[in-house]
Each structure stands twice: as structure tokens, then as C-alpha cells.
Image: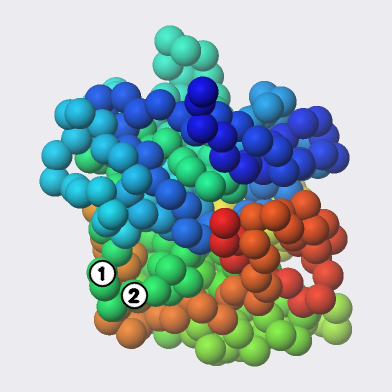
Amino acid sequence: MAQKMKAAIFVEPGRIVLDEKTIPDVGPLDALIRITTTTICGTDIHILKGEYPVTPGLTIGHEPVGVIEKLGSAVQGYHEGQRVIAGAITPSGHSAACLCGCHSQDGAGSRHGFKPMGGWRFGNTIDGAQAEYLLVPDAMTNLAPIPDSLSDEQVLMCPDIMSTGFSGAERGRVTIGDTVAVFAQGPIGLCATAGARLMGATTIIGVEAVPARVDIARGMGADQVVDFTKVDPVDEIMRLTDGRGGDVAIEALGRQETFEAALRVLRPGGTLSSLGVYSGDLKIPFAPFLAGLGDHTIVTTLCPGGKERMRRLMEVIASGRLDTRPLVTHRFNLDQIEEAYDLFANQRDGVLKVAITP
């Protein structure tokens, strides 16, 4: 008789429930990991609300930290019992997208049909991490060993939130001496702020109204934080930059208003780096777009995955240059996953990120 495990399963819009599933079989290139810590992401809330479609019956979650339970027959370089993480993006390493250097888009537009998130498979096209066990495809491409010196919670943001936030700064090509505006200081925006600082920005302006997030933003590298409930953030950012505007504006919320504001604060030739997951059509306003003549760059980002990306992010943590543990504000066990979703979806009690431990 097949062994069972607990898993958070998408049933229909508005319903993610804890139920049982069969522990998956391990193929030659796969690894089965026993989840020790995971979390709920804002994208999971888009799934819960029906704003991003997935197949009913899918296990949700894409931020795994765990221990190798079983290795596929062809997997080399790892051992059972080893602590590992895998990125939210799990590239195969051999697709056309990977070989073009865009690992995050592995699978997009393939013969299997277009899926807009490319290499995002966990909790999107295959079963995800909010379960007792997770099957990791292409294990030798995606499993990154966790240094003994780092705890689960220290590396918990690496699979997605930290990688995505850093990508906003990387894709925006932040450089030494830049002024960067980061719209929204949720978990991804906070990591974008930290990434901008690490890349050499010397003036970082966050946009946020929640006092606890303002405090964390300052700790992550924000020099100024603009409260959009008290002042117009565009006017204030232009004032703070003596009318020059920002070299880079990072949109980390996924709203029309913040996208427009990010465009409005750019200097001529500046870059809008868009990280938010949008739930509908975006409009580009005529005036701040300067009728298309402003030499602006607009870039979008799906964070890179793979073991080398994860190794580098863990090196940042191990070096002491960034501590993402303050982002974890609540902790639940897997049996409480429905309660955790309710808290996180409704943004109660100052929640930033929740840690889920089976």
C-alpha cells in the first residue's frame, strides 16, 4: 500500500485545504526531500483567490527547505540525509531557454504549451512544497546543500523572496552611486532594498506606510522611507532627489498605481524594474512615458533558480551582509496551514512571512 503524506491542496478559488496525498515515486534524475521548513508566498494568495490559474488538486508552495529522503538512481554528488534547498524556479539545464542563458523561463512556450511563469514548476505545474515531502526534478541542477552553520530560517528566503528581490536590483542594473526608489516594502520589496544596497546604490528610498515594515526597511538599507498615506510619493521622491528623479525604480507590489508612480519618478533614461505579479492589464500613461521618447527601460523579472543561484544567496547570508530572519513574523505547523493562509491572505497581525514546519 502506497505511503501517504499531508499536503496543502488547491481545491478551487477561495479554498486551499490540508489533505492526504501519496508520497511520490522517485525517477532517475529526481530527489525526494522531506520538508523541514517552508512558507506561504504572495503568489500563493493569487492562486487562492483564483487570480493565477492552477489545476485543482495541486499541492501549493515553492519555497522548500528540507533533507534528502531518497535519491534517483542517476543522481550523483548528494547523499541521503543531506540538508538542502531548491529554488522556486527549477530549470532543467538543457532547454532552449536555459541554453540561451534565461534559466527562469525554462519551459515557456515549449511544445507542452505556454505557461507564463516558465521554470516556476513547484505549486504551479507540479506539486509544491507545502507538504511533508517534495519531489525535486533535475536534482543535480536544483539541489543546493545548506552549510552546517546556517539554520532553516536563515536560508528560508533564498528559494524565492530573496532571489526575486535581488533580481529587481540586478535587472535594473543598479550601480555604484545610484538613487533607487522601491515601491512597497513587503518581503520582496525589502529584499529589493537590500539588493540595491549590496549593488552599490547610495540613496535608497522606500515607499511604505506600515510602521513595522518601515523599521525593517531601514535595517535592510533604505535611507529614506516615504509614507504614501501622508504625502504624494512621486512628489516626495522628486523633492528628495532635487528634481532629478531616480536612476532605477523597483515596483514590488503588482498594482497599476505603483507601476505608474515608479515610471513617474524615473530620471530621463532611467529604468523601471517590475517585480510585482499583476492581476490584470497594465496601462502605460502618456505623460510620464514621454510619448515613448524618454529613453526609459522597462524590465520584468522572474527570479533565477538552480543550485548556483541558491549557493550564492546562501553565501550572502553566511557572510553576514544580510539577515532575512526578521521577515519571518509568524510560525505554524503544517496542520495549521489553513489558519496560516487565512492570516496571510488577510494581512492580519503585522504579518510579513510565515514559516511552516511539518
Q: Secondary structure at mark 1?
A: loop
Residue under circle 1? Answer: 147
Residue under circle 2? Answer: 150
Residue found at x 57% / y 88%: 218
Residue 301 is situated, as x and y percent measured from the top left of the image, at 49, 47
Question: Is disc 2 surrounded by few (<14), some (14 to 19) or many (20+) residues within 10 Å?
Answer: few
Residue 249 located left or right of residue 18:
left
Residue 79 located left or right of residue 264:
left
Image coloring type: rainbow
Q: Is residue 90 above or below residue 308?
A: above
Q: Is residue 281 above or below residue 323?
A: above
Residue found at x 25% / y 25%: 28
Residue 319 located left or right of residue 286:
left
As measured in the structure, the alpha-carbon distance from the residue carrying label 1 to the one carrying label 2 is 6 Å
Of residues 331 and 208, which is closer to you in this image?
Answer: 331
Assign the C terminus to one quadrant of the image: bottom right
Residue found at x 73% / y 48%: 45
Residue 183 is situated, as x and y percent measured from the top left of the image, at 65, 67
Q: Amino acid at mark 2?
A: Leu
Q: Quadrant of residue 211?
A: bottom right
Q: Secondary structure at mark 2?
A: loop
Q: Are marks 1 and 2 in contact (CB under 8 Å)?
A: yes
